[in-house]
Image: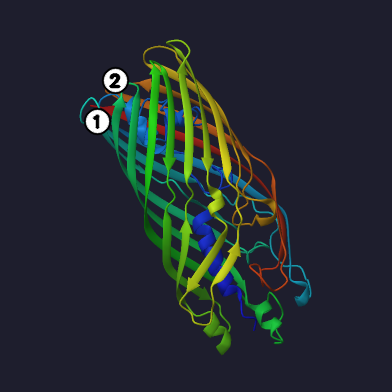
Amino acid sequence: MPKNTPKAYLLAAAAAAVVSAPLPGMASGYLLKEQSASGQGTSFAGVTANAMGDATALFFNPAALGAVNGNEAVGVLSGIFPSAKTTNAVGTRAARLGGGRISGTSNSDDIGVDAALPSAYFAYTVSPDVKVGLAVTAPWGLSTDYPENWVGRYHGIHSSLQTLNITPTVSYKLLPDLTVAGGIQFQYAKARLSQAVDFGSILASTGAAVLPGSRDGMGEVKGSDWGFGATAGLLYEPAKGTRFGLSYRSSISHELEGDAKFEGVPAVPAMRASFANSFVKAKVTTPDIIGFGAYHEVTSDFAVMADVQWTNWSRFKELRIRYSNPLRTDSLTEEQWDDAWFFALGAAYKVNEKLTLRAGVAYDQTPVQDQYRTPRIPDGDRYWLSVGAGYQLTDNIRTDIGYTHVFANTTKVNLSDNLTGADAFRGNLSAEYKASVDIIALQTKISF
């Protein structure tokens, strides 16, 4: 039996799902920007300069505290409704196994998974120059599900990533027009992945009288970890109604630990030993993010804003898996992601003292190179179109709503299987992806 059987590749794909869970129509890679309803309304234009004027900007720039008046608590709930369809998918087995077609469905109605994404913020004024804040967010992840009988099932069925990020922040007004700030990130990551395993093809490759595809099994991997990082930023206000922000969110390294479990393993001693349930580790690192934002009040009722964000996705060069089964060496999967940019422009109009209307557009670049795209990460460039509104219900309570429709470029997956490398025994696969997403965010701010 070949040295690198699908177990190694299943584990590699599991860690890949952790660091790059497919998010059709979401922010590029596996970043979740949806942390503010007031920011959602402008496609997050100006968030680094706190164009919203509330504590939700803490997610984008800790120095945003400088533009928060008094004390406030903010709760946000974003509903994310992706639509991602696989069309014209064709799977065939490696030529050395006869090259026959892989049975199953070629078109998936929707692999996206609807999700509710909560976040919470707190800002408190210690003195005119010192403020403290707390952000509780979920900056990375989401889920996708393919039918268990789709033709690419050996490449992946379920992928999910959940994160929890707790960031206490302190800001200081260094000069009358300049606020600096920093924070510490405490981040928990949890992931799960499943895929089919073609035990029939593995046995056939050894010369056994077994047909490829005749003995499908299932593999599942779960893992979790706590990691730590930092945030830093500044907010410059050269004139009343004009602000510029610069922020940095550090990378966070996770040493994910968990278990690999398999079902349907044939009763062959060597196979049972190779696919025994085992403990697994994978070191993964989230990217650094640098953001720059601008906000300017053209009149007392009308403001324009912009944001530029650079994400250091090129950290994701490879994926290396270590596992306790002594029959396996490290599994290495090449990813070679590129750094990516996000550009947003927006505007806000104050209808009266209680009601504000917002709109914005954005371009979101994918980090995935065409030759490395997989069914687990069918990522493509995206275009955002957003509207929103804020209303002052009482002197102390304000509510905001934001809506975005994201258009995603059509992407293609083309993978080859020659019984070696990362796709060994998964089969050749070609597929086309069409995706979009609708996002509705609600927010309530209580000032005190």
User: Quick check: can you spot residue 444?
Assistant: no
Q: Pointer 1: residues within 10 angstroms few (<14), some, or many (20+)? A: some
Q: Nearer the viewer, residue 203 or 241?
A: 241
Mark number displayed over residue 417:
none
Mark earlier in primary sequence (1, 2): 1
**Which residue is drawn at the image coordinates 20% and 31% (left, top)?**
126
Residue beneath label 2, please?
394
Residue 194 position (above or below residue 302): below
Colour mapping used in the image: rainbow
- Left or right? Give the position of 96 relative to 61: right
Image quadrant in which the C terminus is located: top left
| Relative depth, front residue between 189 and 250 | 250
**Please, what is the three-letter code of the amino acid marked with disc 2?**
Thr
Q: Nearer the viewer, residue 61 or 446?
A: 61
Pick out the residue farthest to the bottom: 269
> Do the CB atoms of the residues marked 1 and 2 lie less than 8 Å apart?
no
Q: Which residue is mark 1?
A: 130
Compared to 386, does 333 lie above or below?
A: below
**Which quadrant does the N terminus fall into?**
bottom right
Determine the residue positioned at 69% across, 54% down.
Answer: 107
Residue 127 picture location, percent across and down = 20, 27
Secondary structure under the numbered disc 2 in the rendered image = loop
